[in-house]
């Protein structure tokens, strides 16, 4: 299988919402991805196989030195093939090229090996404040 990694690709809200739901095991609810990404993201990267979106990641930023990985998702039928790692590394390279000095990521404990070992992040202290719910 050949996978192409495409930065800032034209986003179809239905397609990305479906991928996101499959990757996170939730119901498909169409979200306004294209508008959000254009407004808030430094970049986003899609993984495509035969023109089908099979992976996605976005990078938001503060307009300066800090960027943030969000929404890393790989279609379950294509997991454990290095697609997620390549998505994150491609997004990191784009953030670096844009002048960012730091790339942050928050993740659940079961993703520790992926982000720390596979992608090269290092653990840091951080805080989180829940604002709703």
Image (tube, helix red, strand yellow):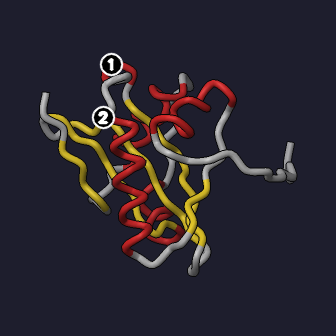
The residue tagged 2 is 54
Residue 96 as seen in the image, left or right of residue 62: left
Alpha-carbon distance for marks 2 and 1? 9 Å
**N-terminal of the two: label 2 or label 1?**
2
Residue 37: image tag: none
Please report contact status of discs 2 and 1: CB closer than 8 Å, yes or no: yes
Q: Nearer the viewer, residue 54 or 63?
A: 63
Residue that numbered label 1 is attached to: 77
Name, please, the residue furthest toward the top: 77
Using the rendered view, name the quadrant where residue 65 is placed. Answer: bottom right
Residue 116, x across and y down, in percent: 56, 39
**Residue 7 lies in what quarter of the image?**
bottom left
Residue visible at 39% across and 21% down? 76
Question: Dividing the image into 4 quarters, which one contains the C terminus?
Answer: top right
Please tell me which residue is depicted at 24% across the width and 54% down the height of the picture: 6
Relative image position of residue 34 (x, y in whole percent):
41, 59
Q: Is residue 43 above or below residue 84?
A: below
């Amino acid at each position: 299988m050949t996978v192409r990694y495409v930065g800032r690709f034209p986003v179809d809200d239905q397609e990305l919402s479906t991928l996101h739901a499959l990757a996170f095991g939730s119901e498909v609810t169409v979200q306004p991805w294209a508008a959000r990404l254009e407004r808030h993201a430094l970049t986003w990267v899609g993984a495509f196989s035969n023109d089908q979106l099979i992976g996605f990641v976005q990078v938001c930023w503060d307009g300066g030195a800090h960027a943030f990985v969000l929404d890393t998702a790989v279609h379950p039928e294509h997991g454990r093939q290095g697609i997620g790692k390549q998505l994150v590394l491609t997004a990191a390279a784009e953030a670096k090229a844009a002048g960012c000095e730091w790339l942050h990521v928050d993740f659940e404990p079961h993703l520790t090996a992926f982000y720390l070992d596979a992608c090269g992040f290092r653990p840091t202290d951080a805080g989180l404040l829940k604002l709703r719910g």
